[in-house]
Image (cartoon, rainbow, N blue to C red):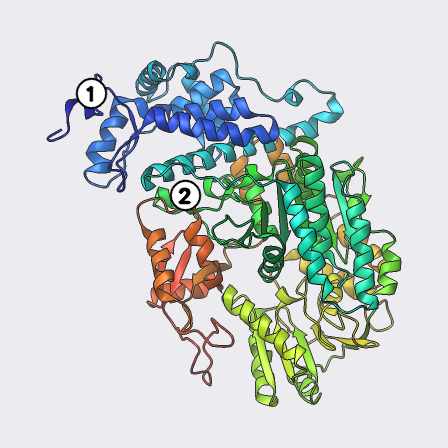
Amino acid sequence: MGSVAADDDPRSRESNELWAHSRSPVSLRRHTLEEHLRGTAALARQFGEAFGAAELAEYLALVHDVGKAACAWQAGLVDRAERTGGRVGVPHKEAGAFLAARYTGKQFAAVVQGHHGGLPAPQVLKTLLLSLRDGRHEDQLLIDEACARAGRLIPEIHPDRPVPVPAWLGPCPPHDRPRQELARDLLIRMLFSCLVDADFLDTAAHFAGLPVRLAPSVAMSGLTERFETRRRHLLAGHPSSEVNDVRQRVYEQVIANAAREPGIYVLHVPTGGGKTLASAGFALHHAAHHGLRRVVVAVPYISITEQNAKVYRDLLDPTDPEDAPVVLEHHSAINLDDDENIWARTAAENWDAPFVVTTTVQLFQSLFANKPAAMRKLHRLAGSVIVLDEVQALPDRLLVPILSALRGLVEYFGVTVVLASATQPDFWSLTQLDGVPRRQLAEEPATLFRDLRRVRYEWRMEADVTWEGIADEISRESGRRTLVVVNSTKDAAMMHRLLRDRTEGHVLHLSTRMTAGHRRETIERMRTLLDAGAEVRVVSTSLIEAGVDIDFPLVYRAWAPAESLQQAAGRCNRDGRLAIGTTVVFRVPGAGAPRDETFTRALDVTATEFGPGRAFPDDLDALDTYYKRRYALQGGGAKGMGTDIDALRALLDFPAVTEAFKMIDDTFTQPVIVIRPDDEPDAIEADIAALRSPYPAGPGPLRRLQPYVAALPRREAQAALAAGLAQPVIGDMLHWQGAYHPERGLDPAEPEDRGAYSM
């Protein structure tokens, strides 16, 4: 051992200490195994209390690293990990999995066995446990030694009775068994989340030389009072109008329902009806009344998280900058679980805040994942109110597992769900919500739609419609303010060029090829120009059409599913300043479209229900028929809408569920950090360096980098990487080194665009 003292020798059976992690660069201390196991267990118990599984979560955390007690692992920590920077090279998960199976049940052994690589497939776990039971595992001597050594240090790993599990896992009637099986899947996921979050927190604290830091507890009643006070102050400056009167009526109806029992609620109001404040107000009042811990607002587009998070921060965050913020905005879609640096996973988000604003992709991909970084935040959902805004954007092909999981969260994990949309899908026509009360938050939606009708529709559906023709038509509207919404980033860039060449006024562009901060600035500039009455044309992808609070007198919408047409119309005459606004729906042959079956099938049904001589997109009866026919196209009822995923969940086949459940094609885009000329490069570079460091970084750097992240098609990202125009950061995130167009962001090469990059 050289200069290492005898009592510090982890290879010796006579060592006074067992270690869990190498020396901290701050404290210069190794992390003792007892400290790590007891610290992780205490955190996991605290997390598990939210869903009645404190003792179970605590035990699984207590045994998760028992395998590190083996002499070979201890030696590997010093000889390879510390001295050469290599890996320990000795397995350690199997000992804890053996203890978990023995004292909690075989199904929960998956939590321990998967705490580094991910929840395993059932056959893999079965094979492992059989070999451990029969004493024929290839590392059996190592496992037995580890259990014996750790047991002398922490006797509680061998309890004198089985660890209790939730009572609802016991025998149940046959007709309830399918739901119980899916609830068991959720329980294992929640316990896994408790363990990996606690493990990451305790490990990161050791390397930082600091105690574990959790967000301070905040009383929901106090947040609710703050919200109401600031909301009244905000609205005091708004002029009286018919639209504002309707919004106030909606708010009062919604808040009146906040004391009702937890469950699944529907908020069906027209665009511009005040959903953002009404849904948050209900969630806060409901959480305060029922003692719930957290509000999670999930929306389909990053642009809405940015807008809504700002609104909620203004209404909820403390005025003293020294106090912890209340609102956490999370929309970075970075894959950290495949990173070679195992400590990179500690940078994953864990939603440790009272009010979280995120995307539906983040929410549901976490719910159906099997890897540690992706699932770290999951346990925070227990005892919360989940507001799903713009639920019409949920993909049909995944509705079965999404609805069954939401039902399971409500029935077993103390969650209330709010389904909010102006184009409310008919989810209760699917069997997953059979027997679940449909609780309406706003009265008489048809009356609200009539009172807030502010738009007329025009159609440009002829075969000879072209992009150039639409651009010519828009440019002839001298002095007008016009929004154009299209279906792809390629179409958005092209239309922006066409309008920029044809008009003298301001022409703005919005797409995910721009960084989040750039998009936010553009939306603010757009609002400023609109308020000033300036001539402005805006070209955007669909990211602007759902929930973004913007008001144009004229909107052009490329042909899209009915709910998108209505959502785009919600940006037209939104505040009722005109007697009537105009939304023009146009169809250009060969226009771009998302690579998504839901979009294609929805477009087919839209053509049968809406258009010239048919219904307008705000016809509620036509929308009801539209959704029923759309679901039927999936093969009849729930078939084809994700029933196979629920079957895999019932089997506890976690990797197969992850593979089958894809909210978006994660092979299509890649996150890219861009430093623009007006950004602060030193701070950004420091966070990038922290993420590249071999030591745990925690979620802080990724939170701070969110405004500087754009999305690039993976094919282009990989080409840029090969050409030296990008560098790896962490996970699949890249640091952009090429040019960035001041209006269109990461715009593909065009000969006339000197600001564009080339490959």
Q: Residue furthest top?
A: 160
On the image, the x and y values in percent for residue 172 come to: 71, 20
Q: Quadrant of the C terminus?
A: bottom left
629 with respect to 699 (left or right): right
Residue at 43% across, 50% down = 700
Q: Quadrant of the N terminus?
A: top left
Badge 2 crowding class, 10 Å Cα cut-off, few under 14, some 14 to 19, many 20 or more, is: many
Nearest to the observer: residue 543 or residue 50 = 50
Q: What amino acid type should be assigned to the residue bearing mark 2?
A: Thr
Residue bearing mark 2: 346
On the image, the x and y values in percent for residue 372 come to: 46, 39
- Please determine whether, in this image, residue 208 is positioned above or below residue 319: above
Nearest to the observer: residue 623 or residue 609 = 623
Badge 1 crowding class, 10 Å Cα cut-off, few under 14, some 14 to 19, many 20 or more, is: some
- Please determine whether, in this image, residue 131 is positioned above or below residue 376: above
Q: Which mark is residue 738?
A: none
Residue at 79% across, 72% down = 576
Is residue 514 something one can see in this rendering?
no
Q: Quadrant of residue 81?
A: top left
Residue bearing mark 1: 12
Is residue 757 something one can see in this rendering?
yes
Secondary structure state at the residue bearing disc 2 = helix
632 with respect to 123 (left or right): right
- Please determine whether, in this image, residue 1 is positioned above or below residue 572: above
Nearest to the observer: residue 625 or residue 441 = 441
Q: What amino acid type should be assigned to the residue bearing mark 1?
A: Ser
On the image, the x and y values in percent for residue 696 come to: 36, 44
On the image, the x and y values in percent for residue 88 come to: 27, 34
